[in-house]
């Protein structure tokens, strides 16, 4: 996964175009690198799945 693809996915989650996105273990670090630099970082929730995969969702209220 490249930076532009991760940014596109995060923007689509934020806009509601996607309700959730499943990130494979091998793509997680590249995705996370883009995610943590965003100002709305706390609005994203990652739910860990078996094998190191993560399901991401966008929350209207930032997590604490």
Image (spheres, rainbow, N blue to C red):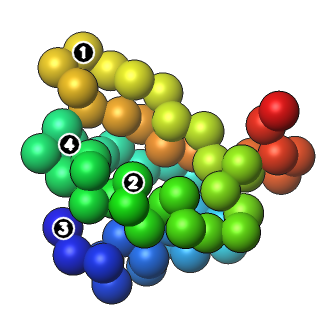
The residue shown at (72%, 51%) is 43
Q: Residue 40 vs residue 56: left or right?
A: right
The residue shown at (36%, 34%) is 54
Kindly identify which numbered label has been placed on residue 1: 3
Q: Nearer the viewer, residue 58 or 64?
A: 64
In space, the residues marked 3 and 1 are separated at their CA atoms by 20 Å
Tag 3 and tag 1, C-beta contact below 8 Å: no
Kindly identify which numbered label has been placed on residue 24: 4
First along the sequence among labels 1 and 2: 2
The location of residue 31, given as percent across then percent down, is: 34, 59
Q: Which residue is mark 1?
A: 50
In space, the residues marked 2 and 4 are separated at their CA atoms by 12 Å
First along the sequence among labels 3 and 4: 3
The location of residue 37, given as percent across then percent down, is: 55, 68
In space, the residues marked 3 and 2 are separated at their CA atoms by 11 Å
Q: Residue 21 vs residue 62: left or right?
A: left
Secondary structure category for the residue under label 3: loop
Please tell me whether mark 1 or mark 2 is closer to you in this view. 2
First along the sequence among labels 2 and 4: 4
Q: Which residue is mark 2?
A: 32
**Image quadrant of residue 22?**
top left
In space, the residues marked 3 and 4 are separated at their CA atoms by 10 Å
Tag 3 and tag 2, C-beta contact below 8 Å: no
Please tell me whether mark 3 or mark 2 is closer to you in this view. 2
Q: Is residue 4 above or below residue 26?
A: below
Secondary structure category for the residue under label 4: loop
Secondary structure category for the residue under label 1: loop
Q: Is residue 31 above or below residue 25?
A: below
Say which quadrant the N terminus sits in.
Answer: bottom left
């Amino acid at each position: 996964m490249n930076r532009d693809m991760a940014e596109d996915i995060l923007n689509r989650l934020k806009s509601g175009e996607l309700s959730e996105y499943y990130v494979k273990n091998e793509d997680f670090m590249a995705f996370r690198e883009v995610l943590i630099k965003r100002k709305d970082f706390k609005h994203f929730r990652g739910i860990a799945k078996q094998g190191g995969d993560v399901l991401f969702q966008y929350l209207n209220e930032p997590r604490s």
